Amino acid sequence: MGTATRTRTVVFTDLANYTAKVSRSDREGLRRILQEHEDLVRPIVTRYGGRIVKNLGDAFLILFTAATDAVRASLDVQHKVTADGGMPLRLSLATGDIEEIDGDAFGEAVNLSARINSKAPPGEIWFSQGTWICMNAAEIPWESVGRFHLKGLPGAQEVYRAVPNHKCWLPEPVKVAARQGTLVRIERGQTPGTLPPDAVILFEGFNPGSAALEAAVDRLPVLNPASLWLAAYNISMQDRIQWGELGRGIVIGTPDAIEQALVDTRKASQRSTGSDTIVLDVGGSADLELVMGGLALPAVPLSDVVASYFYDLLPDGRWVNRSDRAVLRVEVDASGATLAAMGTGVQVNGRPLNSGQSVRLRDGDQVGTSQGTHRFQACPNGSSYAGLVLADTEMRLGVNSGQTAELGREPSHPGLALPDRRGQDNIRWCSGQRAARARSGGFTLDRALAGRRQASVALDGGMLTVTPLHPRCPTWILRDNGVLERAETPQELGWDELVVAGTTVVALRSPE
């Protein structure tokens, strides 16, 4: 007869920066660090009915019968660390069936908690969807931190964060508004004055679901629901759902923690920022800018090699093959392009998406993130592309009249380098030998569809000309009328028309 399984919540505690501490400590110092860790954790675990299964040096594996008690104990540990000024801890939780054999614990929940712990930053408490489902959400201040691919586990895992009473992680739209001076804070009984353009509203001191809150909302002019945010710490699931279903957001934190987070954000906004613009002229401003203007999505199936693929968008606006820091993901299969929110703060046509929510992209869709808006332009059926995700970035090349600039993965000078993203994690392969050979040969979309020297763009007497340079990788032009045509010979372009090379869109802009 096999060992009986039990549903438990598995907690890992881990000392952040432990390796660095060990390298600077003698044996007595090391024993003191580990003893302080145990003296901190053990009484709190015992108080909430947990059991320390084993000590893993700088970590404890702990079991709890109740998920709510496990998260509350983890919050108390973080509160104690903050009060005592001790070494930062990261804590992770997962709930599921485990086996206890000879005093040890085994099972998927143990593995999941350990994997989540490897992702959690110091000073934070991250937990699995299983724990989220089992806990009493009204007792725990929590928020989503997005979806993660965890080593050894299938699919993307939704992960959440418990919020201690001294911390607030401001959502990106609120953070951006605080930096730009467009955040309007409304307390109970307050009537707002004239609102700035693109105002973001933060309601503070209101009871969720109360008549006073709805009255405050009703007094506002017509605003995008996504610009309305409610400050709360403990909030019931029902109130979360009712507020969120209207397209509004929630800032989780105590009043003091939110205030400190806003202060820190405004301080951070004062730091100097660099620029990625490269101006190649001498003694004056450029006459033309070649701007990285978006992601081109090749249609699939592609050459009996690629069945589908995806790209992830980072908070700084870069597209990568895969990232745990992604804001959103765009996936392309034979039926078209699908967008999935990888965290909070993503909107499609003004409608917020929950983390993990997916929508099929349609021509003209406006995708909003904290860094700006991306427009999806579908390409005709039968085209080499499923669509384009368009948004100008700060990656640009300045060119003067009389100059010729190249595009490519390794362009000649002067040139704008196209992305050469390594790795195949974002590709789902077709069956057959052709795909197998491509996979073993290091095939990537970027390398297969764009050459080292792809095309050149020349400005001469106000005339723009694009000339394809690669014999096999085609260069395309998106005309103002929406037609995508292949450039097989030198072609004249209009200002603001787009060059499409591989997976990259390059816009031709006037520097003004």
Image (spheres, rainbow, N blue to C red):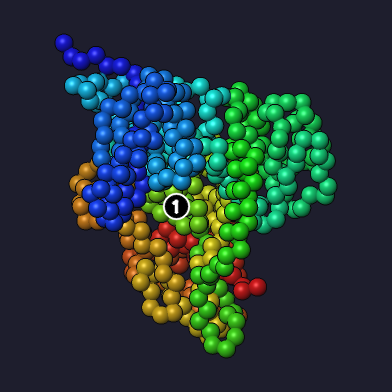
Three-letter amino acid code at the position of disc 1: Leu
Number of labelled discs? Answer: 1
Q: Position of residue 133 (x, y in %)?
A: 46, 23
Most foreground residue, 416 or 89: 89
| Direction from residue 337 to residue 422 in the image, left or right | left
Residue of label 1: 297
Q: Position of residue 369 (x, y in %)?
A: 57, 49
Whether residue 190 can be seen here:
yes
- Other residues around mark 1 within 10 Å, as few (<14) / some (14–19) / many (≥20): many
- Specify the farthest residue to the top: 1
| Direction from residue 227 to residue 35 in the image, left or right | left
- Specify the farthest residue to the bottom: 283
**Residue at image coords 46%, 77%:** 405
**Residue at image coords 20%, 21%:** 101
Question: On the rendered image, what quadrant is the N terminus found in?
Answer: top left
Q: Position of residue 77 (x, y in %)?
A: 44, 35
**Residue at image coords 34%, 50%:** 17
Most foreground residue, 189 or 54: 54
**Residue at image coords 83%, 49%:** 194
